[in-house]
Every structure is written in structure tokens, then in C-alpha cells.
Image (cartoon, rainbow, N blue to C red):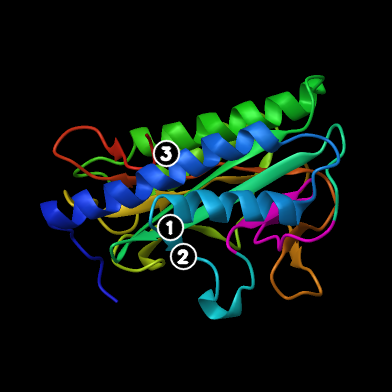
Amino acid sequence: MAILIKKATEITGIREAGKIVALTLRHIENFIKPDVTLTELETICEECIKKHKAISAFKGYRGFPAAVCISINEEVVHGIPDSRRLKLGDLVKIDVGVIKNGFYADGAKTFHVGNHIEPEIKKLLTVTEEALYLGIKAAKVGNRIGDISSAIQEHVEKNGFSVVKELGGHGVGIYLHEEPIIPNFGRPNDGPELQKGMTLAIEPMVNMGRPEVITAQNKWTIITKDRLPSAHFEHTIVITENDAEILTKE
């Protein structure tokens, strides 16, 4: 599939879907606390999406069984909500994909359970979110995908963490997954050139330890091989004449 350049009317539709992603992630933060089950969190997210007359982009996608992905601690992404209960100190990654009037948006955030947070965990969250915004800053007309990738990788590795190389960001908007793939590692001035109207989901997945990951027995959940924690932040953006615009915001 070629990289799709969106019309203004299509970007408006993706922006509406993105707003619901943002609303859902803000809403669910109120429920991130000990003893809440992952399925309860999923239900709250799905109700929020439905309240805004949208549907989950993930449920049923290639057979994925849940409305959102919820991954905890060493789980990187694609976690399937189940009966596990949150505990103080858990890291919770919630990935929300929405379809509104046929348009897609995708966003994710990592939450911490409880107020007391270990310094290294806090650093992991800070660096991952900073890497996302550095990637977004590099997403401008005339740059290339490698400029986004290298900005993310450089920031993560200079802070002592590692990026997951088997997974990355992607085009989004008309479909959930479009070209181009956006690795979280790479070289500047490499890959497809960025053009006005491209809509991209940029999503650093950052491991506290080594970069290697494995797939769980459920064939979905990606887990760090060394079982150390991982963090994940994601926004859907559109390339404009000037700076990229974040579409997954309220």
C-alpha cells in the first residue's frame, strides 16, 4: 500500500476520532488504582468510546478479543484485559484505537498505580514520553521517517534504556494500519520523505533493560525477554506545512 495523503475533510474525521481517544485515556486515569481488574478497565474504556458514538478499532481486528489493549509491567503492548487486579507500583499501558464515521485514530499512555514511584520507573516514563515528543518534533515536511526514528532512539539510549525493534509506529486514518512503518530506531535522512497530509501514529516502546521481546502464549501480548518493565506512549499526528499537529488530543 502506498502512503496515503489525506484531504482536509479526511483529516477532520481523523481529528474527531482522535479526540475520543484522548477523552478515553483521560477518563480511564481516574480508575487506575489497586484492586481494579483489567477487564473492568476495558469495560470503562469501551463505554466511553460508545458514549461518543464511536467503536473500538481493535475489537475483532485480526481476531483481537478486546476493545483496548492493556499491558502491565513487563508486557510491552497488545495485552489482553483479564481478571488480574492492579497492585501498587504496577505500570499500566492502555492503548486505545477508535473508529468514528469511518476514520481511525490511535493513542496510548502508560500509567503508574499509586503515588509513590521508584526513581528509575519515573525516569522510564519521562524518557519514553519525551521520546514521543521528540519524534513528533522531527515529523515535518522535507524530513524523512528516519529522522523520527533516530530522534526517538537517540534520546532513549542516551538515557540508558532500549527501544523495541520488532514493533513500531505506522500510518493511520483511513485504515488502522497503513504505510509507512515508523521504527523506533534508525538513521537520520533515511526512509520515505514526509509530506503534508500524512497521518502517522508515532509510538515509542521503551524497555528498562534489554530490547529483546517475546510473544506470550496467547499469541498477542509482547513481553520483555528479561522481564524488566516497559513503557509506551503514542499519538496520532498529521504533517502540516509547519509543525506536526497532534490529533489525539481533546
Instruction: Characterize the local packing of mark 3: few (<14), some (14-19) or many (20 or more) Cα atoms within 10 angstroms.
Output: many
Kindly indicate whether the residue at mark 2 contacts the one at mark 3 (C-beta within 8 angstroms): no
| Residue drawn 80% across the image and 23% down it | 117
Say which quadrant the N terminus sits in: bottom left
User: What is the three-letter code of the residue carrying label 3?
Assistant: Gly
Q: Is residue 122 above or below residue 142?
A: above
Magenta span of residues: 67-83
| Residue drawn 38% across the image and 56% down it | 53
Q: Which mark is residue 135?
A: 3
Q: Is residue 242 above or below residue 173?
A: above
User: What is the three-letter code of the residue carrying label 1?
Assistant: Val
Say whether residue 81 is magenta: yes
Instruction: Characterize the local packing of mark 1: few (<14), some (14-19) or many (20 or more) Cα atoms within 10 angstroms.
Output: many
Element type at mark 2: loop
Q: Is residue 119 left or right of residue 64?
A: right
What is the C-alpha distance between the residues marked 3 and 2? Answer: 24 Å
**Residue 188 seen from this side:** no
Q: Earlier in the sequence, mark 3 or mark 2?
A: 2
Dividing the picture into quadrants, the one containing residue 218 is: bottom right
Residue identified by numbered label 2: 57
Q: Position of residue 158 (x, y in %)?
A: 62, 30
Residue identified by numbered label 1: 98
Say whether residue 176 is magenta: no
* Residue closer to the observer: 16 or 183: 16
Q: Earlier in the sequence, mark 1 or mark 3?
A: 1
Kindly indicate whether the residue at mark 2 contacts the one at mark 1 (C-beta within 8 angstroms): yes
* Residue closer to the observer: 222 or 64: 64
Q: Is residue 142 left or right of residue 70?
A: left
Q: Position of residue 79 (x, y in %)?
A: 70, 60
